[in-house]
Image (spheres, helix red, strand yellow):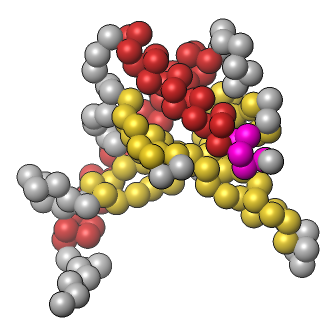
């Protein structure tokens, strides 16, 4: 028997929006902080990966690689509510997008997502690429966090290489 989807009028579907202005502000700040962390980790490496921040509502940055570029865009996602939660959780989702294919009718390129960073208001950040997930822990030694960021960035570098070949 199929489950009946929850109505958009039920509070568990919109309850996270009660405090949306403050939640969105904190998530945007955390997203900027995460991109700054990536920039700092990669600034002195020989990887050729460069993170450039943009302070726009949607486009939050650009990643440059020897293989090409990816736009970083911030969107919003609702995660299913945890057992102890009253409603779904609103999180930020930074998506790396690369040009996919040329639409000959409009002479424009569509963008394909290749990597994402899930940024909650509080807690650890999650990286998703190629069907795999990794966590960048908010707590722990600075060197451990830098290692997690480096691995996530290099996974993005590979995703850019694969998308542009």
Asked if the stretch drawn in magenta spans residue 45, the answer is: no
| Quadrant where the N terminus is found in the figure | bottom left
**Is residue 113 among the parts visible in the rendering?**
yes
Locate residue 119 relative to residue 158 in the image: left or right.
Answer: left
* Residue 39 found in image quarter: top right
Locate residue 25 relative to residue 116 in the image: left or right.
Answer: left
Locate residue 73 relative to residue 148 in the image: left or right.
Answer: right
| Start-end of magenta stretch | 160-164
Task: Indicate the position of residue 112 as horizontal and vertical percent values.
Answer: 67, 58
Name which residue lies at 19% across and 68% down. Answer: 12
Locate residue 93 relative to residue 102 in the image: left or right.
Answer: left
Task: Indicate the position of residue 36 as horizontal and vertical percent values.
Answer: 54, 23
**Is residue 7 among the parts visible in the rendering?**
no
Residue toward you, 52 or 161: 161
The kind of secondary structure the magenta stretch mainly shows is helix
Name which residue lies at 53% across and 49% down. Answer: 130
Task: Indicate the position of residue 154 as horizontal and vertical percent values.
Answer: 60, 29
* Residue 156 found in image quarter: top right
Residue toward you, 151 or 40: 151
The outermost residue toward the left is: 84
Residue toward you, 150 or 51: 150
Name which residue lies at 27% across and 54% down. Answer: 89
The outermost residue toward the bottom is: 1
């Amino acid at each position: 028997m199929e489950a009946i989807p929850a109505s958009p009028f039920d509070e568990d579907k919109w309850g996270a929006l009660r405090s949306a202005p403050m939640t969105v502000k904190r998530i945007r700040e955390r997203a900027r902080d995460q991109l700054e962390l990536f920039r700092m980790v990669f600034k002195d490496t020989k990887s050729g990966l460069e993170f450039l921040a943009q302070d726009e509502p949607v486009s939050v940055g650009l990643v440059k690689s020897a293989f090409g570029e990816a736009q970083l865009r911030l969107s919003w996602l609702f995660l299913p509510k945890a057992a102890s939660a009253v409603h779904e959780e609103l999180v930020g989702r930074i998506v790396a997008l690369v040009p996919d294919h040329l639409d000959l009718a409009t002479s424009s390129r569509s963008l394909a997502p290749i990597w994402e960073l899930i940024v909650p208001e509080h807690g650890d950040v999650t990286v998703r690429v190629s069907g795999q997930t990794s966590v960048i822990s908010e707590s722990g030694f600075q060197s451990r966090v830098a290692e997690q960021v480096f691995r996530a960035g290099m996974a993005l570098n590979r995703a850019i290489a694969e998308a542009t070949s």
